[in-house]
Amino acid sequence: MMDWTDRHCRAFHRTLTRGALLYSEMLTADAIIHGDRERLLGFSDVEHPVALQVGGSDPAKMAQAARIGADWGYDEINLNIGCPSDRVQSGRFGACLMLEPDLVAHVWRAAQEATPEVQVTIKSRIAVDDQEPREALFALVDACAREGCKSFTVHARKAWLSGLSPKENRDVPPLDYELVRALKRERPELEVVLNGGLRDLDHALAEGAGVDGVMLGRAAYQTPAVLLDVDGQVFGAAPPCATREEAVEAYFPYIACNLAAGASLHSMTRHMLGLFASQPGGRLWRRVLSERGVRAGAGVEVVRDALAEVSHARSQAA
């Protein structure tokens, strides 16, 4: 979710769900250690619970990055062993580490020992390239479990490190949800979370029967209204906002505060474009935010105008 689940995105998603665990963009250990920490790691208190997702293969650096993340207040540190991009491969982290389960276990242990008060988890694919998925997945999980790792989020697709683009790696390799469910059945003491290709909440809950949780990625970003049902259906609690419109209103104070601090309107509203997908006025909503939200000096009134277009379209459709 690089370039997607930044702090503005997560603050917006908190207007839709209180209970779901939110994830940061994946950051490299080097970026966390040497980069602008306020820009990379800063987040609002409203985002809790929130996990910091980190990529890297050097145990000492991962330990340092995990410690920094814990000190910044993240509720979980997640090691990404699933991203297949060229940048990730050249840096020897992400999905290519599926080929080195013992190294992953060593990296996990270093991170967990550095942050004993915060859980360190792992996110992986089921395999890469010509690996046999069951063999590769169980080898990775068992190596890390021997070191003490208890929680694994599994994107139920193989990743091809050459021949497919990162986008194609999210769609082309076939999904194998049953393998992830089998992992939970055969390793019941572990927490297993299912990820990959889950279209909406109903699909996620159906396929997630038999595992401990589900992770929504693109579905939650591209059609964020799916999150309105999470608290009720998953946690048995009322959502923070009952409707899309209420969520927009709840986000206004955050927008105003960050505009005053120098953020651009587009940096916040770009995460809201899919909120009214498939709804009357949805295209007008996107058009107003896309065309006017990028202009210099754009303010909250742009979002109010976009919301008015939705309201008008709904009244016309009624």
Image (spheres, grey):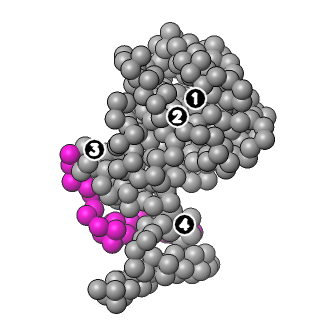
In this rendering, position of residue 62 left or right of residue 280: right
Say whether disc 4 or disc 2 marks the residue closer to the N-terminus.
Answer: 2
Would you name the residue on which mark 3 appears? 234
Q: Select label 2 or label 3 by which is in front.
A: 2
Nearest to the eye among marks 1 and 2: give it.
Answer: 2
- Location of residue 163 by image quarter: top right
Q: Position of residue 314 (x, y in %)?
A: 34, 83
Name the residue tied to disc 2: 176
Residue position for label 1: 126
- Identify which amino acid the numbered label 3 is placed on: Val
Task: Name above or below for residue 246 compared with residue 221.
Answer: below
- Is there CB contact under 8 Å for labels 1 and 2? yes
Q: CA distance from mark 1 to mark 3?
A: 26 Å
Q: Which label's residue is closer to the chain start, 1 or 3?
A: 1
Q: Is residue 214 magenta?
A: no
Against 81, is 271 above or below? below
Q: Which residues are magenta?
A: 236-264
- Between the residue at mark 4 and the residue at mark 1, the CA separation in whole angstroms equals 32 Å
Nearest to N terminus: mark 4 or mark 1: 1
Q: Position of residue 153 (x, y in %)?
A: 48, 32
Q: Quadrant of residue 80?
A: top right
Q: Is residue 305 left or right of residue 292?
A: left
| Distance from Cα at disc 4 to Cα at disc 2 | 32 Å
Which residue is painted at 47% across and 18% down in the image? 149
Which one is closest to the eye, mark 3 or mark 4? 3
**Residue, x 39% and y 45% (percent of image)?**
204
First reached walking from the N terminus: tag 3 or tag 4: 3
What is the three-letter code of the residue carrying label 4? Arg
